[in-house]
Image (cartoon, rainbow, N blue to C red):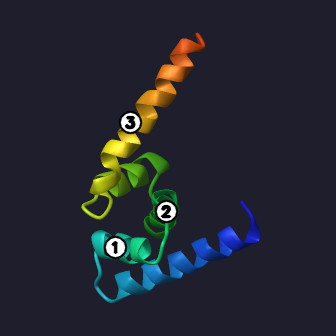
Amino acid sequence: MNEEQLEKLRLGLCIAVHLREQGGDVDAVLACLRHHQYFQSDCIVVLREMDEIDLGEAKRIVLLSPVWRDRLSEHETMVDKLLGEIEDEGMELDG
């Protein structure tokens, strides 16, 4: 991650904290970040830092949010494709 990306995430975190202080909920934060061209992965990082939650919970919240629901099918397709490629290569995933 380069300095420009880190600065964007810092700004996103500032925006998120400010919105929360003004009474905004998670969906308001995510909607604002998406409006400002933040990616899903950026939103996951910001939410994780802001709420001090683990990565899995942050992913679940972002991916299932109304703000990002339109991308859920695309995300699931990508994961299925990746898992298929791993299986085709004969690799095994722990867990």
Does residue 49 appear left or right of residue 80 in this picture? Answer: right
The percent position of residue 83, horizontal first and vertical second, equals 48, 25
Does residue 5 appear left or right of residue 20 in this picture? Answer: right
Label 1: state its secondary structure.
helix
Q: Amino acid at mark 2?
A: Phe
Q: Earlier in the sequence, mark 2 or mark 3?
A: 2
Which residue occupies 36% across, 38% down? Answer: 76
Distance in Å between CA atoms under marks 2 and 3: 17 Å
Q: Quadrant of residue 88?
A: top right
Above or below 26: residue 84: above
Above or below 42: residue 32: below
Query: In this orientation, does residue 1 appear?
Result: yes
In-front residue for pair 2/52: 2
Q: Are marks 2 and 3 in contact (CB under 8 Å)?
A: no
Q: Residue furthest top?
A: 90
The percent position of residue 81, horizontal first and vertical second, equals 46, 29
Which residue occupies 44% across, 57% down? Answer: 53
The percent position of residue 56, horizontal first and vertical second, equals 43, 46
Where is the N terminus found, in terms of image quarters?
A: bottom right
Q: Are marks 3 and 1 in contact (CB under 8 Å)?
A: no
Which residue occupies 40% across, 44% down? Answer: 75
Q: Which residue is mark 1?
A: 31
Number of the label disc, if any, that sits on residue 77: 3
Q: Are marks 2 and 1 in contact (CB under 8 Å)?
A: no
Query: In this orientation, does residue 94 appear?
Result: no
